[in-house]
Amino acid sequence: MGNGYTKPKLISLRNHPQLSEKWVQDIIAEDPSVLGLGSLVLRDRERIQPKAGRLDLLLQDTETYKRFEVELQLGSTDETHIIRTIEYWDLERRRYPQYEHCAVLIAEDITSRFLNVVSMFNGSIPLIAIQMQAYEVGEHTTLVFTKVLDEFERGLVDEDEDAASAPTDRQYWETVKGTPATVALADSVLSIAREFDATLELKYNKFYIGLSRQGQAYNFISMRPKKNFLVLEIKIPKLEENDAIIENAGLETLEYNTRWGYYPIRLKAPEIKKHEEVLRTLIEMAHELKVS
C-alpha cells in the first residue's frame, strides 16, 4: 500500500518450517518484559527437573524476587501441558520455598476447555495463562502475548474472609517464608500500629501476617516477611498526595494493588527506623479508614 501500512498476517508457529519453540525461548530470554508480567530477568532455561524433564524458562521479578516457572506450547493447550506446567511449578516451590512462585503457561491457542478446567483450581494454584500469536509484518515476524488468565491475587483478608485463610504460627514465618530478623520487622511495624490501637496483635496466616483485635481479624495493614526484607502492605487509596508522600520519603514501593487497594512497600531493618514518621502517617491513615 502507498500509505506505508502493512497488514499483519497471522501465522502458525507449530506448522512453520523454520520458526520453532527455541526461537520463541530466545526472544523471551533476551527480553522477558515482552510477556507483560513486569520487570523480569532470566534465571535459567531448559532447567532440568528430577525425573520430570526440563522447565522451559525460569524468570524472576527484580523487585519482589518472585519466580515464574514458564512452559511454552506451540499450538493448542492440552492435558499433558497443564500437568507439566503445574508439576514444574510444584517442584521449584518445594526446592526454593524462600521465594513466591507462579506457574506460567504460554500457548498459541488457549482453548475454552482449558480455561474452564484451570479456573476450577486457580484459587489454590497461582497460574497465569498467556496466548501467544505470531504475525508476519512485511519481511519480519513479531509476537504478541496476551494474558487470558491471571493469577489469583491474595491480599488483605477481612473479617468475613478470615475463615478461608490458613492459620500458621511465628515459627513457620521465621523458618519457611522469612527469617527471625525479617519477622522481627513485623514486630516493629506492630509497635507503630499499636499507637492507634493498643489491643492489636499479629495474626499469622499462610500467605501473610495480618492483625487481629480481640481475637478477630482487623486488617488495615498486612506484612509478608521474606528472607532479606519485609513487604508492608498499607491499605489506603491510590491518590496523588499519597504517591507524593511515599515518593518524597524515598520509600521503595512495588506496583499498587488495585484489586485489594494497598501500597506494597519493601523495607529492611534500617529503613523502618529511618522512615518511622512517614510510616506512622501512612499507617494512621489506613487505621482511620478502617474505623470510619
Image (cartoon, rainbow, N blue to C red):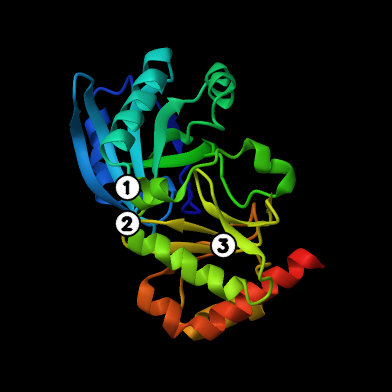
Q: Is residue 289 above or below residue 28?
A: below
Q: How many marks?
A: 3
Left or right of residue 150: residue 228: left
Residue at 51 percent across and 64 percent down: it is 232
Closer to the chain start, of discs 1 and 2, is: 1
Closer to the chain start, of discs 3 and 2, is: 2
| Tag 3: amino acid | Tyr
| Tag 1: amino acid | Gln
Q: Which quarter of the rendered picture does the C terminus lie within?
A: bottom right
Q: In front here: 74 or 265? A: 265
Q: Is mark 1 on a helix, strand or loop?
A: loop
Q: In this view, does 101 lie above or below 22?
A: below
Residue under circle 1?
98
Residue at 72 percent across and 48 percent down: it is 159
Q: Nearer the viewer, mark 3 or mark 2?
A: 2
Residue at 41 percent across and 28 percent down: it is 107
Residue 211: image quadrant is: bottom right
Q: Is residue 226 above or below residue 23?
A: below
Q: In front here: 27 or 287? A: 287
Asked if the residue under mark 2 is in contact with the one under mark 3, i.e. CB atoms within 8 Å, the reply is no
Q: Nearer the viewer, mark 3 or mark 1?
A: 1
Residue under circle 3?
256
Residue under circle 2?
227
Inter-mark Cα distance, 3 to 1: 23 Å
**Is the residue marked by circle 3 packed among few (<14), some (14-19), or many (20+) residues within 10 Å?**
some
Q: Is residue 135 visible?
A: no
**Is the residue marked by circle 2 packed among few (<14), some (14-19), or many (20+) residues within 10 Å?**
some
Inter-mark Cα distance, 3 to 2: 22 Å
Q: Is mark 2 on a helix, strand or loop?
A: loop
Q: Is residue 102 visible?
A: yes
Q: Which residue lies furthest to the top in this view?
A: 79
